[in-house]
């Protein structure tokens, strides 16, 4: 009986720990002598799952209580709170309705009308922001809590691939994966980022010419990469692989835009603008974290050896 109770307590602790994935960040900015804007960013910090069992929060919102016992009513706060949806995990949400469903009934809905009616629905990685206009004198008397409910429907949803078909598909996945990885997208661009001269008041014309040369070198490399990757996404035999290739394309597009901006600014002679453009371009060139994460997901998902 003791062992059974301990097991139940362990399970309850794991369930209660799910609350730790609903997180918030707060900032307070003064807008006037007596007014402030309280900004609360609420987000789902859970990782997404590839076999169902996602931690999804429904009915997410703020509960506001006047600690002096005064009930101002929902209309009072609705006029003072601006809610902005900042992100949606479209790819993750689409997985629930991907392909064709064959069971004689309706498929598993992404979100039901009831789940949508109680507040925000936050899938892993999604977040929303609340901006509250309030007086500085009123703020100390305000109790605010972020609330939401873990969706049991999503948590206990199971998606198990047919392993025999996965084994048949794996050689094609590995072949396409290695084909993509044989295209050295990142190394030359990282070398360009690390080789860029710093822009400062002492920057010379030679430095500007060097930046122009690096941008042109980067353009040539991207054109070559785009040619070599052409068609790989259409032949990719798995969703994860297509997402990986799509993330590479997204990275390439962001770098191309940074190249365009930098090239336009370089001829202006405006050093502050040149510095900003070069710094942003360097940030884009080195912004490879998501590409690396998608790559790691495929290696783990299909157990691909390096």
Image (cartoon, rainbow, N blue to C red):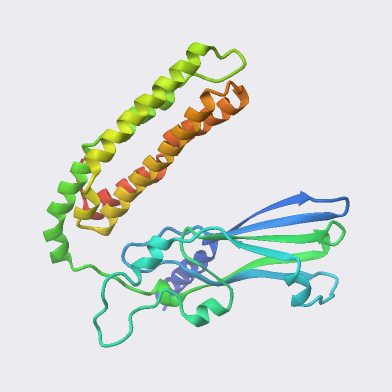
Left or right of 63 on screen, residue 135 = right
Quadrant in the picture for the N terminus: bottom left
Depth check, front residue: 235 or 5: 235
Q: Residue at x 24, y 51 (%)?
A: 233
Q: Residue at x 59, y 18 (%)?
A: 200
Left or right of 73 on screen, residue 47 = left
- The x, y position of residue 226, in whole percent, is 28, 40
Q: Quadrant of residue 3?
A: bottom left
Depth check, front residue: 265 or 158: 265
Q: How many marks?
A: 0
Depth check, front residue: 288 or 260: 260
Q: Is residue 276 above or below residue 240?
A: above
Q: Residue at x 77, y 60 (%)?
A: 133
Residue 13 showing in the rendered view: yes
Q: Quadrant of residue 111?
A: bottom left
- The x, y position of residue 237, in whole percent, is 19, 57
Q: Residue at x 35, y 30 (%)?
A: 219
- The x, y position of residue 279, in whole percent, is 53, 29
Residue 286 showing in the rendered view: no
Q: Is residue 207 above or below residue 96?
A: above
Left or right of 205 on screen, residue 146 = right
Q: Is residue 210 above or below residue 273?
A: above
- The x, y position of residue 135, in whole percent, is 84, 59
Quadrant in the picture for the C terminus: top left
């Amino acid at each position: 009986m003791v062992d059974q109770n301990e097991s139940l307590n362990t399970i309850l602790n794991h369930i209660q720990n799910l609350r730790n994935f609903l997180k918030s960040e707060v900032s307070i900015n003064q807008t006037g002598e007596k007014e402030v804007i309280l900004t609360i960013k609420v987000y789902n910090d859970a990782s997404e799952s590839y076999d169902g069992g996602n931690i999804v929060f429904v009915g997410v919102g703020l509960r506001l209580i006047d600690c002096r016992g005064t009930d101002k009513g929902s209309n009072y706060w609705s006029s003072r709170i601006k809610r902005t949806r900042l992100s949606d995990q479209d790819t993750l949400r689409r997985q629930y309705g991907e392909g064709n469903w064959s069971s004689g009934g309706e498929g598993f809905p992404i979100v039901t009308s009831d789940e949508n009616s109680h507040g925000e629905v936050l899938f892993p990685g999604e977040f929303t922001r609340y901006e509250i206009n309030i007086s500085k004198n009123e703020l100390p008397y305000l109790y605010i809590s972020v609330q939401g409910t873990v969706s049991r429907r999503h948590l206990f949803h199971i998606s198990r691939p047919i392993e025999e078909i996965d084994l048949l598909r794996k050689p094609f996945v590995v072949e396409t994966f290695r084909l993509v990885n044989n295209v050295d997208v990142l190394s030359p661009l990282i070398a360009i980022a690390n080789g860029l001269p710093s822009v400062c008041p002492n920057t010379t014309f030679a430095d500007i010419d060097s930046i122009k040369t690096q941008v042109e070198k980067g353009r040539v490399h991207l054109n070559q990469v785009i040619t070599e990757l052409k068609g790989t996404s259409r032949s990719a035999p798995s969703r994860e692989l297509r997402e990986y290739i799509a993330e590479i394309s997204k990275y390439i597009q962001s770098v191309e835009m940074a190249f365009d901006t930098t090239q336009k600014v370089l001829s202006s002679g405006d050093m502050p603008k040149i510095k900003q453009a070069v710094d942003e371009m360097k940030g884009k060139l080195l912004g490879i974290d998501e590409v690396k994460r998608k790559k790691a997901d495929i290696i783990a998902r299909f157990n691909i050896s390096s």
